[in-house]
Amino acid sequence: MGKTNDLVDFMLSLTREMGDEYNRIQKRSTEDQGTAGDQGEENWASIFKNWLPADYQVVTKGRLLSEKGVASPQVDVIILRPFYPKHLLDKKLYLTAGVAAAFECKNTLKASHIVKTVQNSVEVRNLLNIRQGNYRDEIYSPIIYGLLAHSHSWKGAESKPKNVIEEKLHECDRLFVTHPREMLDFVCVSDLALWSSYKLPMNFYTYQESGNYFYKWMPGPQTGYGFSEREAYTVNTEPYKNFTPIGAFLSKLFKKLALHDNRLIDFSHYFGQTIGGGASIKFRTWPENILSEGARTDLLHNQSLYQGNWMSEG
């Protein structure tokens, strides 16, 4: 039997621990739902504290404060950038310029949680002043926003939780998201699957000619939610046995953090190769003018596009 990377074993162990914590919390959740929710948030906060670089600060229960003094709805877990002032760590109003990521946490995911989190994602992104003229700044929000859950509410024999979550996520995206940067970055259900955002600054167009398939890049961004699950792999193969939603989530979180923290590029690549998992994606195509004229010019003159480098910016 071949050896597996220890990172795989850590993620499998972490998944079991989250399952055990969910069962423990559920035993007393009817007595005090508030405490149960707090315990679930602390589980996710502990993961970030243990796996992110030590200089990232992780806090719970706070609001994000814009430059204009406008505050977001309360967020369960917030990841602060390494330079965040220590004096402000316990103030519960966190300056958006120093926020790397924010997550809403649920013990048992319901459809209503997806609706509210997508709405909050849009609201948080609209707190930020976006520098126009650079396609990266316009498409990729400096704050990652996601929804994390231990488990889900669709437990019946005939239930199809992955389909329900996927359909609700795409429905909310169409209803509430009016710009690529507003979309939710993650939905991670630790005992089920992962959905993560992918953004292409141009439209990947496929066409057929004389029986052969070709592709070309067309103006207009594309966005989609990559769906990662164990069942994407052949049963009992190593990828099937090694996949965990939490492992895939951390891999893609590092990748998104690396867009603003170059120190994480090699580390995110290592995680991606080891525990990242693949993804199936249904794309939404945006009109060309969703980007400013300056950003479109930047896009057309950016040589890295023609080398495919930006394809890794999921």
Image (cartoon, helix red, strand yellow):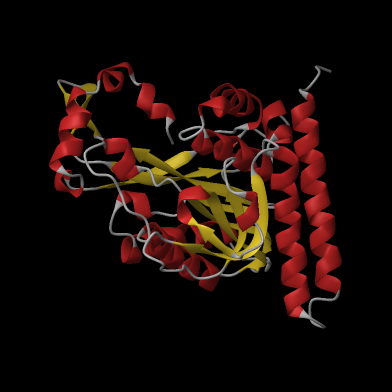
The answer to whether 313 appears left or right of 239 in the picture is: left
For image coordinates 41% across by 68% down, the residue present is: 70
Asked whether, in this view, residue 112 is left or right of residue 282, the answer is right
Question: Residue 40 location in percent, x, y?
Answer: 74, 63
The picture quadrant where one finds residue 208 is top left
- Does the rendering let one see residue 219? no
Residue at 17 percent across and 44 percent down: it is 292
Farthest front residue in view: 87
Where 17 falls versus 206 (above or below)?
below
Is residue 241 at least partly visible in the picture? yes
Q: Is residue 288 above or below residue 299?
A: below
Numbered-mark total = 0
205, 36: nearer the viewer = 36
Task: Kindly identify the residue that appears in the image at 32 percent across and 41 percent down.
Answer: 137
The residue sitting at 66% across, 61% down in the picture is 90
Quadrant assignment, res 200: top left
Where does residue 131 sit, x and y in percent of width and height?
28, 45
Residue 63 image position (x, y, % from top left) = 54, 66
Q: Is residue 128 above or below residue 123?
A: above
Residue located farthest toward the bottom when viewing the structure as drawn: 31
Q: Is residue 198 above or below residue 25?
A: above
Residue 248 on image: x %, y %? 62, 39
Q: Quadrant of the N terminus?
A: top right
Q: Nearer the viewer, residue 237 or 83?
A: 83
Front one among 206 and 245: 245
Quarter the C terminus occupies: top left
